[in-house]
Image: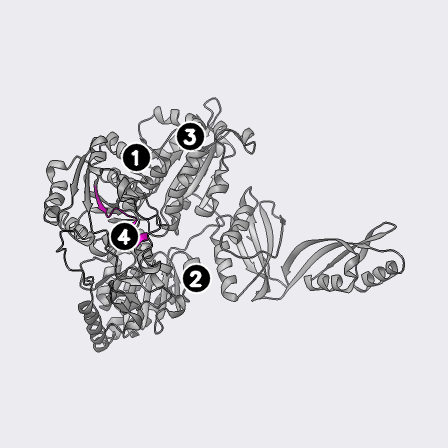
Amino acid sequence: MSEMLSGADMLVRALQDEGVEYLFGYPGGAALHIYDAIFRQQKVEHILVRHEQAATHMADGYARATGKPGVVLVTSGPGATNAITGIATAYMDSIPIVVISGQVPRAQIGTDAFQETDMVGVSRPVVKHSFLVKDCAEIPRTVRTAFHIATTGRPGPVVIDVPKDTTDPAVTAAYEYPETVALRSYKPAARGNGRQIRKAAKALLGAKRPIIYSGGGVVQSDGGLALQELARRLGAPVTNTLMGLGAFPGDDAQCLGMLGMHGTYEANMAMHHADLIFAIGARFDDRVTNNPAKFCPDAQIVHVDVDPASISKIIAAHIPIVGDAANVLKELNAVLQAEMAKHPELPDQQAHKVWWGRIDEWRAAHGLDHGSAPSTNGVILPQQVVKSLYRATGGEAYVTSDVGQHQMFAAQYYKFPMGRRWINSGGLGTMGFGLPAAMGVQFAYPKATVACVTGEGSFMMNMQELSTCLQYGLPIKVVCLNNQALGMVKQWQDMQYGGRHSHSTYSDSLPDFKTVAEAFGHVGFRIDNPADLDAAMDEAFSPKLKDKVVFVDVWVDPDEHVYPMAVKGGSMRDMYLNKITTSQQGDYM
Amino acid sequence: MSRRILAVLLENEAGALSRVIGLFAQRNYNIETLTVAPTEDATLSRVTITTEGSDKKIEQITKHLNRLIEVVKVLDLQESPCIEREMMFVKIHAEGPARAEVKRTCDIFRGQIVDVTASAYTVQLTGASDKLDAFLRAIDQSAVIEVVRSGVSGISRGDKVLSA
């Protein structure tokens, strides 16, 4: 005999049965029955945020760091619409989150009731799937299905819109949590096609100038070790996308760093000159490929992705493989092992030696050192700050970021040793993501060092969450590269709009962030002398301050640009290398 | 660029169709015609969409449709021999000598006159879309009062079946 529960109690019980630890949310009228059910239990801990957008980013950060789905609860209307940016952020980066939104009672739907928004409609383009609960008895199966869809195949956000009367405490139904989900229309591929994998192995072994282009899919499938095995076996260079950083260790000799718009010179040159690109868990984003018509002219493309729609969307794949990145890597390694035993002459060592020779030349010629001398004029360079952070944390921190120049500097200079350590909004590019995402990570790993690299512009988009940090004792370390401007916008205006800084500066009206941090009950530093940088960074991460939020406001050179930068409309080898030098068609060499 | 007919089996659930239509809008694909109705299995709807696009674009549309949770099957009908039909009503001004001419043209196209007034005929015509287009070209444009087309429905020839 199953238990009779109200819709609200069923919803919370289903979250318990799903193993949910934290529910990030904000109450409101349509969600009050659910909030009462939360009050009457202890298993799922609700975290009260200060803005619903931050709740979605926290759930997102939690999901990126753990691989487990993040869960959000908001009310109808403005609660639901405030969550949209966070849902879209998770959608673009394929992050599993489940967002439960209150809705007006069923009878009022469509009447323009108070705080009514068609959440299923508003969220439709930015969710993997969504549900509108029609009856309280559906709730257990709906929750089970939502988690299944969010976490399998290409992960993504799922919305469950819950009309208030379906959670009415006076109406009960039998609770039984389904063990399995059967959806005739949803069967994501897990394993790659064996024949395609053998074809890929053959292509990899035959290549003279191979490169592995690894993306967020490898991080999400926890395929890092299998990727490393593949790279070692082949002796091939690896470049990671912005979303894929860490899946291959950043300080490894075979790692060329990030590729794309602000990728390293060697990564972009190697891509352009490769005869085989092994793309895995990556989607040939426009920030990677530059002009698709000029993309890597000599390369045969092997493309592995769990989502068939990502394959041949931008760049046609010669050998497409649909499957989970980690599974495909493991199978490929097994095939390669057998093939290499049979053909000890493969891969062509002499060709690889020549290939690595060219890569080493590119590295030596440019690397990440783009000619900016370490500050001599008493101004801190933003790159120095990330290097200092890397040093102070021993490369072992979880690092979240916001969006802009600081994000690119963090991606370039922090060498992540493994996946899930670098957490940023890559696809949507959501300013305001960094602090709440860091909080989600800290909830998942209370003892870990969690740093948020931000800029003063991004930080002000969700700084209200400093209050939530105090409430729950989350000792986030915020490292703010304060250039008193919207730096990336300003960089584009410098490079493409004759230096006309249209609405990208506000230096007269910035708050004193040290005081802001203190007002929220935290510790704040302000650093503007290069000589103080390392000491301040060490202090921020010292045992003395390990239980405190520390806001390190570092005033950096406002004129610094991020380089390399892709030349618009060019191929991958066309890059601005610094304010003076451009590598047009590789002529930099 | 070519005109293509996609047949989609869809869970017969509220909101499912809006996802299909939303996908076309969101990804900048064009819908020329759209028909929807339940199938012999009441839990499934069948949607027929005609659209324009290169092979690459049609492949993308098909893949994105398949990504939708409620989409059970997608078939590019013209991959194999198929039958397509569209139904049309045309209300035509028909008085004096033109009245007989409309009737004659209607007969040539094997249409039926399904409603008659002193000044107009309503013609019902079924066929492939180009036949309906040809009929509209054949009659006096200034006499056309109203045109209603159903959009295309299609089915594969022979033993080939689109089923869950």
Asked if the residue at tag 4 contacts the one at tag 3, i.e. Cβ–Cβ closer than 8 Å, the answer is: no
Question: What type is the residue that disc 4 sits on?
Answer: Gln
Q: Which residues are magenta?
A: A478-490
- Residue A476 has which mark? none
Q: Are marks 3 and 1 on the same chain?
A: yes
Structural crowding at the residue carrying mark 4, measured as other residues with C-alpha within 10 Å and reported as few (<14), some (14–19) or many (≥20): many
Which chain hosts label 2?
A
Q: Which amino acid type is marked by label 2?
A: Lys
- Position of residue A129 relative to residue A276, above or below, is above
Q: Earlier in the sequence, mark 2 or mark 3?
A: 3
* Disc number lying in front (2 or 4): 4
Contact between marks 1 and 4 (CB within 8 A): the answer is: no
Asked if marks 2 and 3 touch (Cβ < 8 Å), the reply is no
Classify mark 1: helix, strand or loop.
Answer: helix
Per the image, label 3 sits on a secondary structure element best described as: helix
Residue in view at x 55 percent, y 59 percent: B75
- Residue A336 picture location, percent across and down: 28, 67
Which numbered dot is residue A464?
Answer: 1
Mark 1 chain: A
Task: Check disc 2 and report the residue beneath it.
Answer: A313
Indicate the secondary structure of the residue bearing disc 4.
helix
> Does residue A262 appear anywhere in the picture?
yes
Whichever of callouts 1 and 2 sits on the residue coming sooner in the sequence is 2
Q: Relative to A356, does residue B59 appear above or below in the rendering?
A: above
Task: Please state if B94 lies on the left or on the right of A364 as rendered.
Answer: right
Label number found at residue A10 = 3
Q: Which dot, 2 or 3, sits closer to the camera?
A: 2
Query: Given contact means CB atoms under 8 Å apart, are the residues at marks 2 and 4 in contact?
Result: no
Residue B157 in percent (x, y) is at: 64, 63
